[in-house]
Amino acid sequence: MRTGAPEVPATGVWAEVVGQPDAVGTLHAAADAARRQVRGEPVPPGAMTHAWLFTGPPGSGRSIAARAFAAALECEDPETPGCGKCTACRTVLHGTHADVKLVVPEGLSISVAEMRALVQAAARRPSTGQWRVVLIEDSDRLTEGAANALLKAVEEPPPRTVFLLCAPSDHPEDVSVTIRSRCRVLQLRTPLSGAIAEVLRERDDIEPQLAEWAAEVCGGHIGRARRLATDELARERRESVLRIPLGLQRFADVFTAASGLVKLAETEAVTANEDRNESEREELKTAMGAGGTGKGTASATRGANAALKELEKRQKSRTTRSQRDALDLALVDLAGFYRDVLVTRTGSQAVLNHPDFARASAKAAAEWTSESTLRRLEAVLECRTALTQNVKPLIAVEAMLATLFTG
């Protein structure tokens, strides 16, 4: 990322990219260079490239920045790329632009078959816009085969195709070294709480006090701040998680808390996907001619049943991922609590992750040693790792809570 990038007013599509002025300046300059490149005008070497890697912590807005950049590349405004008002900008942001392919993995990984089909589509010339853009959210979920298929396309890109990859970091565990070496890396930072609160107040019309609280406790995650500010159930789920550390009074509480935490994640996953799953089932039944009569009905019914089974398989995978994401978010909250305990024990003036639970973290700081607090924190982080390795959630959580109890 170029720290000397010009500052761009937070208007148009760039208004969606919160707290990232340097990144916005770099992307705006690249979109302007891309526009001049299409017109055949000379542009500085490296001003625009065919592959970008957006990195940053969860909630920093990686995919939002990538979508804004895609919109700026397709923007129809003759003066400013990324006006946010033209048809191209609106359709890109809504995910319906013909030349912008959004890949949002709904399962735990992106398969090689899916990536090969995507690479084939990316080889075509743009149909309505200036560029064909392939935006892959969570590219760290690429399987090895899928990453190899993508690498071939990135190594020999079509002349008017741009690949935008989003991942937590450019570490080899997230993105292969070979793909990383062919991308321009744009590192986003955690947005400051003041910037998040301002967005909640002005764009989402959240009451100021609630906006400030949500911005302080969201861990720099813009989407979560909005959810906490608008969803009372989300606030209740967070409170129930943060009550766990001091609620483990007996060893039997380990199993009760583990069951409750996993059930909480399952419920959140089902709730998040319930309406969409039902809508997809109804749309598929209608498309397959459900309720029809006459010749061919039996054959159509068999085809519909097979298609429904495949849909249910994808929906199950999506729900599993949602459950893992919800559980991981709870673990991040727990890790933040133990970090607050350490901050309190050392007398540091660092800002707490959970200032509204300062009394609880102070009580824990008075009862626990720094060593036992660190062991508890490590147990939470180990649980997060175990879940990425497909350990059964209940077993991983019970093992973690046993350490949280014993210290």
Image (cartoon, grey):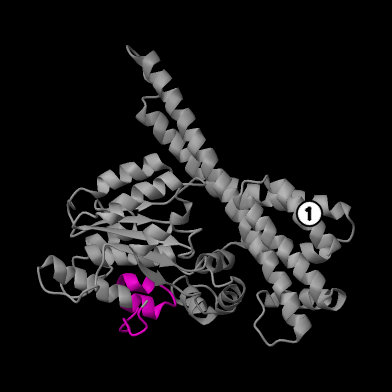
Which of 381 and 363 lies nearest the eye of the viewer? 381
Can the viewer see residue 237 in this picture? no
- Residue at the image point whose x is 63% and y is 51% from the top: 387
The vertical placement of 277 against 23, above or below, is above
User: Can residue 163 be found in the magenta stretch?
Assistant: no
Can the viewer see residue 210 in this picture? yes
Q: Quadrant of residue 83?
A: bottom left
- Stretch of the chain drawn in magenta: 2-25
The vertical placement of 56 against 392, above or below, is below
Q: Point out the image quarter for the C terminus.
A: bottom right
**Mark 1 burial class by Cα count in 10 Å: few <14, some 14-19, many 20+:** many
Q: Which residue is mark 1?
A: 257
Q: Residue 350: x percent and y percent? A: 66, 84
- Residue at the image point whose x is 52% and y is 73% from the top: 206
Q: Residue 367: x percent and y percent? A: 87, 75
167 with respect to 237 (left or right): left
Classify mark 1: helix, strand or loop.
helix
